[in-house]
Amino acid sequence: MANWRQMINQEAAKHGDSLDGFVCTLPNEELWVNFDDSYGGDNGKPFVAWSNGRVYFPVNYDGLDTVESVPRHPCETVPRHICGG
């Protein structure tokens, strides 16, 4: 079991993002709802979230839910292909 908030926090830590100015299309309480993130289908509710530094979104690859992010502002960083794997 997992929830979007845990996954967003992990993704933010990976990029050194502080989540300042965090805004999300899901209410905060829905970010903490646990769901089965294992292979088999889309299980978490869709969302888009913004911090001052990054944009966060769900990715589903072969039924496995994860969170990915890209820089919020134009920069020299080129993201890899977003496929969840």
Image: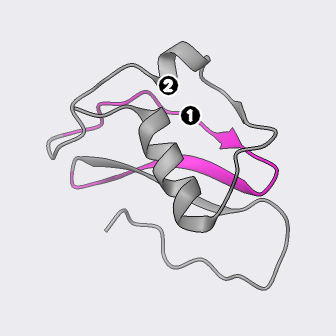
- Element under label 2? helix
User: In percent of the image, x 75 and y 46: which residue is there?
Assistant: 51
Eyeballing the image, is 58 above or below 42? Answer: below
Magenta span contains residue 74: no
Residue 73 marker: none
- Label 2, residues with CA under 10 Å away: few <14, some 14-19, many ≥20: some
* Closer-to-camera residue (8/41): 8
Eyeballing the image, is 49 above or below 35? Answer: below
- Can residue 68 be seen here? no
Q: Which residues are magenta?
A: 41-62
- Label 1, residues with CA under 10 Å away: few <14, some 14-19, many ≥20: some
Q: How many marks?
A: 2
Estimate the spatial distance between the alpha carbons at disc 1 and disc 2, rounded to whole Å.
9 Å
Magenta span contains residue 54: yes
Eyeballing the image, is 78 above or below 1? Answer: below
Residue 31 marker: 2
Tags 1 and 2 touching, CB below 8 Å: yes
User: In percent of the image, x 27 and y 26: which residue is there?
Assistant: 35
- Element under label 1? loop
Eyeballing the image, is 34 above or below 56? Answer: above
In primary-sequence order, the first of circles 1 and 2 is 2
Question: In this image, 33 relative to 46: left or right?
Answer: left
Residue 16: image quadrant is: bottom right
Question: Which amino acid, mark 2?
Answer: Leu
Residue under numbered circle 1: 47
Q: Position of residue 39 (x, y in %)?
A: 15, 47
Quadrant placement of the N terminus: top left
Q: Position of residue 44 (x, y in %)?
A: 36, 30
